[in-house]
Amino acid sequence: MPAPISAEQRERDRDALLDTAEELFYERGIQAVGMDQVRAASGLSLKRIYESYATKEDLVVAVLRRRDRRWRGDLAAYVEQVPAARERVLAVFDWLALWFARPGFRGCAWINAHGELGTTSPAVLAEVREHKRAFRAQIAAWADATGAPVADPVFLLAEGAIVTAGITGDPTPAGHARSAAATLLGTG
């Protein structure tokens, strides 16, 4: 009988599984990636995978939830280094431009997941909606600090830039959206 797996090893395996699944789902698409591919790439048995996540849908939700924490955390770390409120709002678009220019950028993971599963998976739809709600709240906090009523337009500019860059493979929509946000803020 094999030795029991420690809590630390389970955590390492779960992290490796989430890393692998996130990479595969983002690169190839959720529906295009089977659990056998996740198993092969992660080096974990299907039994170990299903001990952590009972269904592929559970794994997708876990990937999106973890990615949300990291993605919004990275954005906040970048934006909050900027001291002036109006410049913080514009820094959102500077960060987006850097993200869009990264190798392997394939657009918004939540929009991609919604496009694949949003009509058939209530759990994925809920996770996508929660991410968008939290992202809008993050934008609103920075926009509201300027005193200008621009939270919704700035959020829509950011979302539009993300979708456009994802489809075109061109990072320049971030700069266009930044210019529009600057105009809204009266700084452009």
Image (spheres, rainbow, N blue to C red):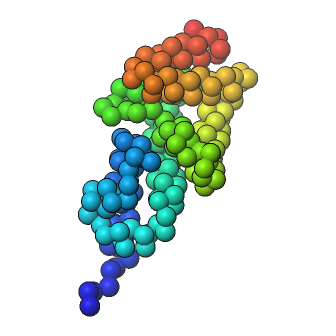
Q: Is residue 84 visible?
A: no
Q: Is residue 179 visible?
A: yes
Q: As displayed, is residue 89 above or below residue 22?
A: above
User: Viewed as shown, does residue 60 lie left or right of 49?
Assistant: right
Foreground of the two, 181 or 11? 11
Residue drawn where x is 45% and y is 32% of the image? 107
Quarter holding the C terminus is top right
Residue 35 lies in quadrant = bottom left
Instruction: State the residue lying farthest toward the bottom.
Output: 1
User: Viewed as shown, does residue 126 lie left or right of 29?
Assistant: right
Instruction: State the residue lying farthest toward the top.
Output: 188
User: Viewed as shown, does residue 139 lie left or right of 82?
Assistant: right
Q: As displayed, is residue 81 above or below residue 21?
A: above
Q: Position of residue 16 (x, y in %)?
A: 33, 60
Q: Position of residue 56 (x, y in %)?
A: 47, 59
Foreground of the two, 142 or 18? 18
Residue drawn where x is 38% and y is 50% of the image? 33
Q: Position of residue 104 (x, y in %)?
A: 33, 34
Q: Position of residue 163 (x, y in %)?
A: 51, 27
Residue drawn where x is 62% and y is 11% of the image? 183
Residue drawn where x is 45% and y is 25% of the image? 167
Q: As displayed, is residue 177 above or below residue 33?
A: above
Residue 97 lies in quadrant = top left
Quarter holding the N terminus is bottom left
Foreground of the two, 142 or 64? 64
